[in-house]
Image (cartoon, rainbow, N blue to C red):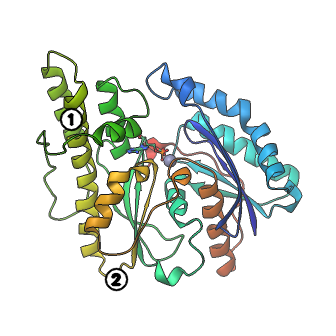
Amino acid sequence: MLLLGIESSCDETAIAVVKDGRDVVASNVYSQIEVHSVFGGVVPEVAAREHLKVIDSMTKQTLQESKTTIDRIDAIAVTQGPGLIGALLVGISYAKGLSQSSGKPLIPVNHVHAHVHGALLGLGSDHDVIFPCISAVVSGGHTNLYYMKSPTSFELLAYSIDDACGESFDKVAKLLNLGYPGGPKIEKLAKSGNPKSYPMPVMVEQKTRLQFSYSGLKTYMVNLINRENAPFSGDRLADLCASFQEEALGQLIRKMKAALELKPDTRSILIAGGVAANHRFKELVSNSIKVPAMFPETRFCSDNAAMIAACGYHICQDLRGQNLPLPDPDWDAFSRYKYI
Ligand code: KG4
Ligand code: ZN
């Protein structure tokens, strides 16, 4: 089954063609980072207009690279939300038009759930070794843990009550004048730093439920940086980045371990989202998580459309398995502000 995936939830326009939810035939991502960097963050209206400029030509190019045409595509999967409403509407409206004109079914996909499929891409169909699993989506907008019995069942175990993990990297990088996105910049500097140089605040664990919080760590960093008379540079900057990164990632590790205790039949852990590209994160997971852990290829950690097409494929399979009809295309976008 060949799916066309369309993603436009934030500042990346992405189009992909994926076979059977696993094999990526072609995947293209246009990043708007340069357009937004002058503003120090993503400007929603600008993002929507940038998507509009490239979405049609990127779709044509991706189909061409796949040596296929829309007639040979079995279904179109598009990000329904969460995301920036204006940005989402560009992708959804385009996908609806394409679906109407080609007669191909249209599958709405949840962007956060789709990130998990970034880690599943290329893993093969032997789902017995993977499920039930714990999945972690650690991105600029979300820090979620799910318990999954199949590629389409998502039981939310934990989410952030304030900032997302990637967002805290971005905000701290901005304070240190490192630019956007902050994650890769902090990771690079942290490599030569000592993570024990600066003691960091550790979130008080809730006894009754799992949850993430990053605003305390961020506020601590704001106060620490503002207290200094001179800007951080050289070894001190590297030490500060390493100390912050260690606690930002340390919280993820502690919560993953707690989730594994809560769900002892877990066979594997899938880690996805932009922060999954962090090498220190991979190291910490391999040192302290006892079940096999799977990370996406770096190109499928951050926003892409291959994960959307793969997720759409599993939704189709699931509905067909239950003899249910594919979704009616009469639906709309949903914002990240209505979704945890
Ligand atoms: O998944 P993603 O591309 O977009 C969202 O859906 O949010 O994630 C982007 C986030 C940004 O906050 C970025 O700073 C963070 O992922 N990120 C990283 C790294 N690469 C990207 N965080 C830590 N270390 C990295 N190497
Ligand atoms: Zn994302």
The reply, left or right, for residue 55 in relation to residue 287 is right
Query: What amino acid type is highlighted by mark number 1?
Result: Leu
At x 59%, y 75%, the residue is 124
Locate residue 224, reporting x and y percent: 15, 28
Image height of 269 relative to 41, above or below = below
The reply, left or right, for residue 135 in relation to residue 289 is right
State which quarter of the image contains the N terminus: bottom right
The reply, left or right, for residue 185 in relation to residue 10 is left
Q: Which mark is residue 265?
A: 2
Locate residue 146, reporting x and y percent: 39, 65
- Decide if ligand 1 comes within 8 Å of the CB at mark 2: no
Q: Kindly tell me whether residue 159 is visible in this rendering.
A: no
Q: Kindly tell me whether residue 43 is visible in this rendering.
A: yes
Locate residue 321, reporting x and y percent: 66, 80
Query: What amino acid type is highlighted by mark number 2?
Result: Asp
Q: Quote the CA–CA distance across marks 2 and 1.
A: 38 Å
Locate residue 111, reporting x and y percent: 54, 52
- Give the mark toward the camera: 2 or 1: 1
Instruction: Name the N-terminal-most of marks 2 and 1.
Output: 1
SS at mark 2 in the image = loop
Residue under label 1, please give it.
Answer: 240
- Mark 2 packing: few (<14 Cα in 10 Å), some, or many (20+)? few
Q: Nearer the viewer, residue 311 or 316?
A: 311
